[in-house]
Amino acid sequence: MTTSFKKMLAARLTAGTHPGNVYSGMAVMLVMLLMMVTSCRRFDGHDCNDCDCLSKDYKQTNLVADTAGFGAAHIDQNLLNAWGLAVGPTGAFWISSNGTDQSVIYDKDGNTLRAPVRIPAFSEKGGSAPSGVVFNNTNSFGGAHFIFATESGTIVAWTSGDSGVIKVDRSRTNAVYKGITIANDNGSFYIYATNFHDGTVDIYDSAFNLIVYNGIHDPNIPAGFAPFNIKNIDGLLYITYAKQKPDKHDDQAGPGNGYVDVFKPDGSFVRRFASQGTLNSPWGITEGCTGFAGLGDDVILIGNFGDGRINAYNENGTFLGQLKKGNAPLQIDGLWALESHVTGAGNKIFFTAGPNGESHGLFGYIQKN
């Protein structure tokens, strides 16, 4: 019993209050105190929408769009269905322009830094449709700086010049690569690419040789769901799953259509991070910056392509709520990538999107006011 409760008890008894009533009142006060202490404690497992642990004051700023009407500071017609996003050591943003078969390059304010880089297709009859992209901060993969996945089933590396080079061509097997990352396993670096059509994560060595087909697999993911995106966060692989349409090329959006797993680079399962709930074709994955949500560095943000909302979880997968603008969830139509911890950008979370059914392109950031 704390000193304050002892003093209260003595005062009540001195005043002639019946002891039973005193203890009953103390019990009620104790319960109320515990509720106050635990209701908004960081990472306690509650839904933070109920107590507003996540701020309702997030602001979306559009930096670049392909056309007027989005309130963007810059217009670039090369930005069409802006998808994958990777940031190099100079702070340059390399964005997959899925609709123009290019990568566009901006600074953190949306200024164009150089001419677009062509992402070649395996055949001139069809486009490459680049999706995910990863910055290569290793000495592996032939010195490539950026490596792109494409929906046409290729993996393209860029080292210099105005065009990337096709390093992997699995177009004839109907591969549809949506996401890509790099990880170290036992001293060697590998590429991990999500093959949405086949429902696999394909692993390539530093010479771009396929070493494992479906090297990462969760047998408890329901049939009809496939790996959608993948990201290396602190040496662990976060993989999102979306529901396949019948053609197995695109996702079927809908409430609850999504899962998130965590694996080690060697393919061993760590844990189910999130299941259904507010997930809706989840693709964007990033860590929350310090102070972004008032919850420290351990926040993982998962963005929904399906409804444009952003889900916040703690490092163990406890749902903390969705980012809000006022009393409603913040929504970015056609949301794809999320990227944080950008040098010189504070606690901004950068995003890409393909609004209006992927017919336009958008690059910007969100930040708590």
Image (spheres, rainbow, N blue to C red):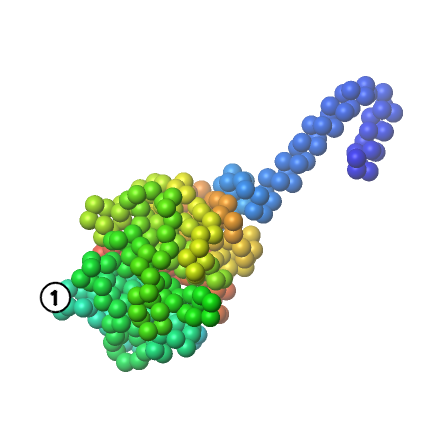
Look at 64% across and 38% down and name the residue there.
Answer: 36
Residue 336 or residue 173, whichever sits in front: 173
27 displayed left or right of 243: right
Look at 22% across and 63% down and name the residue there.
Answer: 170
Residue 260 percent location from the top left of the image? 41, 49
Give the quarter of the figure containing the N terminus: top right
The answer to whether residue 75 is seen in the rendering is no
Which image quadrant for residue 158? bottom left
* Amino acid type, callout 1: Lys
Which image quadrant for residue 95? bottom left
In the image, farthest residue toward the left: 125
Residue 97 or residue 11, whichever sits in front: 97
Residue 112 percent location from the top left of the image? 32, 73
| Mark 1 lies on residue | 125
Look at 51% across and 40% down and name the residue there.
Answer: 47
Residue 94 or residue 244, whichever sits in front: 244
In this rendering, is residue 38 above or below 113?
A: above
Look at 31% across and 71% down and name the residue there.
Answer: 208
